[in-house]
Image (cartoon, rainbow, N blue to C red):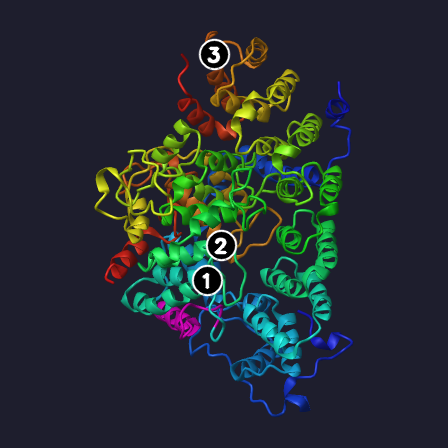
Amino acid sequence: MESDEDEVMQRVPLSERPEWSDVTPVPQDDGPNPVVPIDYKPDFVETMDYFRAIYVADERSSRALNLTAEAISFNPGNYTVWHFRRLVLEALDIDLQVELDFIDNIAKNNSKNYQIWHHRRWVAEKLGTDAADKELEFTKKILSADAKHYHAWSHRQWVLLALGGWEDELDYCRELLEEDIFNNSAWNQRYFVITRSPLLGGLEAMRESEVSYTVEAILAHPENESPWRYLRGLYKGDTQSWVNDHQVSLLCLRVLNTKSNFVFALSTLLDLLCHGLQPSQEAKDVVAALEMSGTVEPDSDLAKSVCFILEHVDPIRANYWRWRKSKLPHAT
Amino acid sequence: MSSAERANNNSMTAAPTKTQQEQWIVENQVFQIFDLFANLPRNAKSALVELQRDNHLEYLTRGLKRLDPSFCVLDANRPWLCYWILHSIALLGDYVEHEVENNVVDFLSRCQDPNGGYGGGPGQLPHLATTYAAVNALITVGGERSLSSINREKVYMFLKRMKQPSGAFRMHDAGEIDVRACYTAISVASVLNILDDELIQNVGDYILSCQTYEGGISGEPGAEAHGGYTFCGFATMILINEVNRLDLAGLLDWVAFRQGREGGFQGRTNKLVDSCYSFWQGGAFALLQRLHAILDEQLVNFGPQTGVASDISGGEESSDGTQVDDKTCHFKLGGTNASCPVNLNSIGYNFVKQPGEMEALYHRWSLQQYILLCAQDMEGGLKDKPGKRRDFYHTCYSLSGLSLSQHSWSQDEDAPPLPNAVMGPYANLLERTHPLFNVVLDQYYDAHEFFDTP
């Protein structure tokens, strides 16, 4: 809450600017007894009063454009100001490349703000495919500071779909995953690329190589939920292939054999069994080795045993595992 | 042994990733609090696990009366501030003075646009989110004056203007499109009894396209599964009677794994716990509890239905298994109700009237423990996690999640929860909230009756 006097450039009140002398500011109609009233600073009040004047008058001039910038700097969340700014930009036919720089500046301290990202998308859409590289760079910069930034990822996906630039995207995902294999946003982006990139063959074509990649990630950190969900996702729409792919069940057994970090391995095995996997003797042995003595009858259904173990090793989800057990297809 | 397995064996010595580091820091803070709590003598324990009603109420009522200059960044969100505060007060079973109620109604009326909908403040462009917040706030205040101040015809016209051919909605004139916009629009329409076929057209398709490979729902097609959007998408599908089209087993599995050892919920896989997800993620369980029949059907058939309508408005299910074009399934129920089309505007009411037939599938006790021990601010209000600052948003959604959790196993709608459903003193019990709209149930019933007349 520093006063403007501390800044090098002191703000000149609008009332003292000759170029605004013809405008009568419009006060906010909060009424006599407003609730949630904000203790606005005088600069804020004045800026918004002048904004209201030009908004009501629908003045789409360059001074109006500058005023929207001032209003935005006070409150980047004011979507009405952003909306009006877009109307002015169109009316004045402003060079939108410059607008991108403007957004860059605001985004520095305000990146978690819907309005900025919507505005960015609007500008980029108008600029067309030429903007693709710059937009990919922009989102990359945001993601380098926060690799899971939701808006940045959404924007990046929109850019790829609307403006292109798919060539390096899979590599970019690989880079991010090398930095942090737990980054679920990067896994999600990977899925986005392999399913939608016009340069790749689609999910089924990519499946084999992706399964190898994912299995390796899982073995490095079996406690990492992201690649397990990703693995399941690789068989989306084709559950039978997932059940029949030995790699999947073998992966589960491998992790179960280590007797550590095996919750997802068990959960996956459970899903496989529910979808008709015929368990091997090895699978039964591995699960039996995990059971606490005296808790399960020896000839119990394997899926039931798995649920039982999960109730104990993953107690926060005990209700869920108990429910899963109650919904098991009955063993013959 | 592969290089990956060798790496796993060495994972204790390998440098932790950012995700791991951040998670360990939060877990340490939370477990420190839990350990401290566990080692306290009984009296001190009960004090710590008490819901600080008076402090929270003071924080809330002060906010309603005055907000400091730093709130200028929420100057386009004032109906939200009204809702977060009023709803929290209502959950705490308290009231605001009659005069303040009138002031709320007057203020929100000034936020109402002559062409329909509510903006973030007087004179601002109408926006779906602030419309949702304003309507919910007015319902929470309740009473003739408050409810009649909503211009339903104009709201309807605003919703129609925001409607996109894709089925989704824009947040405001030329604004962004996402699952949140769908929820705010449909929720408002439903609760005001102005929902119709035109508004619901293709919404289901859009939301379906947002259910990700993980099972949760994203904000836009292709984006990451996220707690906030999952609630929005899920609630919307229920309200438009198309919830059977979602992969509910997949959704349940994803949301079940969003609860961490801390007891609270994370918003996305491998991210940090945050008290607000107590409602967004916890709410999904409250919704699932009343969909057990559809869930069961999907489990038997291993997947979402493409033809059978989910008829929850009449409390019955169409079960003749007819493969019907799902675009018309609202009207062709087959079976017993062929002559009676689904009344979209009754869905919200019937949903909450029917008893929950299965228990909530998450660890309710742990969630309540997280909220009470880690999210309460000593000076009133609630916060995301230890080390964060309190705010009205987190106060609202932590309390909403706490309420859902306390009330999550009442088979009889009129019977209060058993003491073992409430962590801490029984006085911690909050008012019940409607799991689809997140408005205190009593206020919802009043509004439902009021708006039942067309």
| Residue type at the position of mark 3 | Val
Q: Position of residue B451 (x, y in %)?
A: 27, 61
* Residue B434 in view of the camera: no
Q: Are the residues flagged by discs 2 and 1 in contact, CB closer than 8 Å? A: yes
Query: Which residue, as the protein is rendered here, is positioned at the far top?
Result: A298
Please provide the residue range marked out in magenta.
Answer: B99-121
Q: Residue at 66% across / 74% down in the picture?
A: A69
Give the left or right position of residue A66, taking residue B169 as reference: right
Instruction: Look at the image and tell me in which quarter the C terminus of chain A lies.
Output: top left
Between label 3 and label 1, give the one nearer the viewer: 1
Residue topped by disc 2: B180
Q: Are the residues flagged by discs 3 and 2 in contact, CB closer than 8 Å? A: no
Give the left or right position of residue A216, taking residue B156 as reference: right
Q: Tag 3's secondary structure?
A: loop
Residue topped by disc 1: B128
Q: Tag 2's secondary structure?
A: helix
Relative height, residue B280 to residue A125 (above, below): above
Residue topped by disc 3: A296
Give the left or right position of residue B401, taking residue B258 as reference: left
Q: Position of residue A165 (x, y in %)?
A: 71, 51
Q: Nearer the viewer, residue B355 or B53?
A: B355
Q: CA distance from mark 3 to mark 2?
A: 46 Å
Residue B407 sits in quarter: top left
